[in-house]
Image (tube, rainbow, N blue to C red):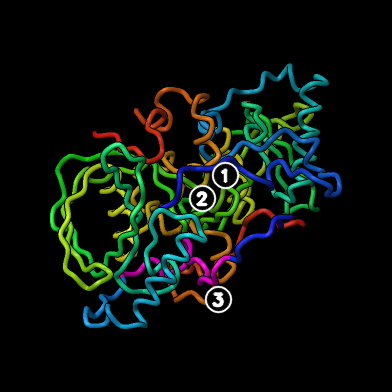
């Protein structure tokens, strides 16, 4: 509660979280002819509202109970000297067409796994293809953090959550500990983890 | 994905005009991710047991058991990295057992599976299999030898607490990552399909700490 007058938050579906069996199953493709329909565009809007309400930087449709293959990611864009701004991208029926042999390590969190963070290994770079919100087929290449976010969201479409990607259970921890890294031993919980800040990827 | 972490809010150190929090007198609970909780603890030198300092710590462990409504609390969870814990003894009269420097030996290869939780892993539960029967030796709160055999629920609880002395938390015992779930989802398990997340898990008992307002 607050004394301030605040803009009411939009109504959004509740989050589906770790342990809900529906979140652990592969989702179904979207019929591309449906993308331009008002019904699907409304879903994209609601998903964007949910991302804002739940304070995410990416969100997949299954996380709000729609078991279809689409997600949103916030992409940081840096143009010239201007401060970076964010663009919201929709990916519908995305595919990962190439993954690099090079792997990277990063701290991940997930709206469906509240209170925890994990130290996760994934390919450092990827090439992807999928439909955007306008129904156009788009191909992109990502490296570093944007590649990380894409792979995390993509995993939701296949029923994977990042705890399923953890190689050592010590790599999973309560979020509050990430605020006190200065107290950690150098190699806790893995070499390089202490000094890799959220939003960074440590190449292997 | 989420934003970078924000500092913890209410719940751990509640503030405001609420009634006095009984947890105020307790040391903060160490939680999953605290590297100290993931290290083996040292044996208690038996000569320390009768000292007022050590007896006072046992008193705080018992208080924590009551305040948190737990079935067991191990010293490392309160930041004391020595090998002792307290547990409820459901087979007995609801008595509470203190174990110092315990040693446990499985007496069967059978496993017993329960849902378990931990004060150090708030918000989550897991379906964990542990030895169905154990023989235990150790010292009691007075430093006297204590020998017991445990089966089923008690065996499971003992091993959970004992694991803390070796720096092991229940997420480290999970056979499949799908066996760890949010407590809120476990509360809705009447809607789960059969065999999610493992055979028998939907109807297995929850050997978690008792919820207390």
Nearer the observer: mark 3 or 2; the answer is 3
Q: CA distance from mark 1 to mark 2?
A: 8 Å
Q: Please provide the residue range marked out in magenta.
A: A9-26
Whether labels 1 and 2 share one chain = yes
The residue indicated by pointer 1 is B159
Q: Helix, strand, or loop for circle 1?
A: helix
Which residue is drawn at the image coordinates 49% and 29% (left, top)?
A181
A91 to the left or right of A126: right
Q: Please identify the dominant SS of the magenta region.
A: loop
> Between disc 3 and disc 1, whose residue precedes?
1
Q: Position of residue A12 (x, y in %)?
A: 51, 71
Nearer the observer: mark 1 or 2; the answer is 1
The residue indicated by pointer 3 is B190
B165 to the left or right of A171: right
Q: Helix, strand, or loop for circle 2?
A: strand
Closer-to-camera residue (A66/B130): A66
Q: CA distance from mark 3 to mark 1?
A: 28 Å
> Between disc 3 and disc 2, whose residue precedes?
2
Q: Position of residue B213 (x, y in %)?
A: 77, 57
Whether labels 3 and 2 share one chain = yes
Q: Quadrant of residue B176?
A: bottom left
The residue indicated by pointer 2 is B131
Which residue is drawn at the image coordinates 29% and 60% (left, top)?
A154
Q: Quadrant of residue B31?
A: top right
The label on residue B121 is none
Q: Helix, strand, or loop for circle 3?
A: helix
Q: Position of residue B114 (x, y in %)?
A: 55, 59
Q: Inspect the magenta stretch and tell me whether residue B45 lies in it.
A: no
Identify the subunit bearing mark 3. Answer: B
Q: Residues within 10 Å of mark 2 (few under 14, many from 20)?
A: many
Is residue B97 shown above or below B213?
above
């Amino acid at each position: 509660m607050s004394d301030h007058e605040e803009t009411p938050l939009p109504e959004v579906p509740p989050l589906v979280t770790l342990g809900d069996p529906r979140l652990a199953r592969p989702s179904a493709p979207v019929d591309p002819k449906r993308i331009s329909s008002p019904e699907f565009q409304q879903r994209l809007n609601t998903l964007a509202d949910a991302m804002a309400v739940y304070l995410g930087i990416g969100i997949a449709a299954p996380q709000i109970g729609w078991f279809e293959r689409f997600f949103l990611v916030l992409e940081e864009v840096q143009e010239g000297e201007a401060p970076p701004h964010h663009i919201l991208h929709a990916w519908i029926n995305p595919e990962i067409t190439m993954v690099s042999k090079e792997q990277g390590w990063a701290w991940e969190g997930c709206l469906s796994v509240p209170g925890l963070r994990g130290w996760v290994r994934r390919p450092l770079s990827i090439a992807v293809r999928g439909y955007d919100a306008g129904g156009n087929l788009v191909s992109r290449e990502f490296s570093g953090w944007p590649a990380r976010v894409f792979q995390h969201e993509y995993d939701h479409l296949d029923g994977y959550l990042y705890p399923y990607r953890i190689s050592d259970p010590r790599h999973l921890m309560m979020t509050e500990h990430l605020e006190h890294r200065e107290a950690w031993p150098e190699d806790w919980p893995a070499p390089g983890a202490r000094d890799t800040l959220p939003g960074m990827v440590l190449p292997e | 994905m989420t934003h970078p972490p924000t500092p913890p809010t209410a719940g751990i150190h509640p503030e405001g005009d609420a009634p006095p929090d009984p947890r105020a007198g307790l040391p903060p609970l160490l939680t999953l991710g605290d590297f100290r909780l993931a290290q083996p603890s040292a044996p208690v030198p038996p000569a320390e047991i009768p000292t007022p300092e050590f007896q006072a710590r046992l008193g705080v462990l018992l208080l924590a058991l009551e305040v948190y409504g737990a079935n067991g609390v191990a010293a490392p969870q309160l930041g004391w990295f020595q090998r002792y814990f307290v547990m409820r003894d459901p087979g007995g009269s609801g008595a509470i057992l203190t174990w110092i420097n315990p040693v446990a030996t499985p007496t069967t290869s059978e496993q017993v599976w329960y849902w378990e939780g931990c004060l150090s892993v708030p918000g989550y539960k897991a379906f964990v299999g542990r030895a169905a029967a154990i023989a235990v030796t150790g010292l009691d709160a007075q430093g006297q030898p204590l020998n017991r055999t445990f089966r089923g629920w008690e065996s499971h609880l003992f091993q959970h607490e004992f694991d803390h002395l070796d720096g092991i938390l229940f997420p480290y015992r999970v056979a499949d990552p799908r066996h760890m779930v949010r407590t809120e989802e476990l509360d809705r398990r009447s809607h789960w399909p059969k065999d999610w997340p493992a055979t028998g898990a939907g109807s297995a008992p929850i050997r978690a700490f008792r919820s207390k307002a």
